[in-house]
Amino acid sequence: MKPPRITTLVDADTISAELESLLLGVYRELSRRPIDRASLKGALYALLEYLSSPVGRTNANCVATDHFFCLREGWDVELDDVPTDFSALIEDLGGALHDTVKAPHVARNFESTPEQLLDRLRRIPAE
């Protein structure tokens, strides 16, 4: 499996090495067939918890995450087999998350801040 493209530089800021690992972890779970709901939820939880933390909540990290899920450059994975509750969250990861730091009111309006997405994830059953 060829790794997908991850934006590593945003407005002259570099994403964290930890973010790249977390994104690839979610991608690996999305690649599994059948989807393991508990593992996918765990990978998404780790990603969103990191983006919600003071260290992970940077413009570069939020924009890169948004681009990863929105553009899906180099993805060999289709989301057709992903359960609807997860695919809706994944679609929103590629929505207004990029506004989290520079235009937080926009991200909040679209319920796309890391905290709002994490709250939604918590309500998705793992089984």
Image (spheres, helix red, strand yellow):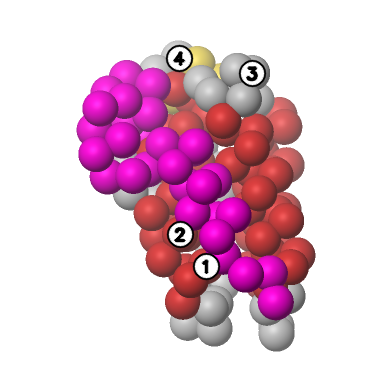
**Circle 3 — which element?**
loop
Q: Secondary structure at mark 4?
A: loop
Q: Earlier in the sequence, mark 4 or mark 2?
A: 4
Residue drawn where x is 62% and y is 70% of the image: 125
| Residue that sits furthest to the top in the current view | 12
> What amino acid is at disc 3?
Val
> Marks 3 and 2: in contact by CB < 8 Å?
no
Q: Amino acid at mark 2?
A: Leu
Percent x, y for residue 116? 44, 42
Q: Earlier in the sequence, mark 4 or mark 1?
A: 4
Q: Which mark is residue 89?
A: 2
Residue 14 sits in quarter: top right
Asked if residue 67 is among those painted magenta in the image, a careful observer would answer: no
Q: Residue furthest front?
A: 123
Q: For this rendering, which residue is in front, 99 or 120?
A: 120
Residue located beneath label 3 in the image:
55
The answer to the question of whether label 2 and label 1 lie on touching residues, with beta carbons closer than 8 A, is yes
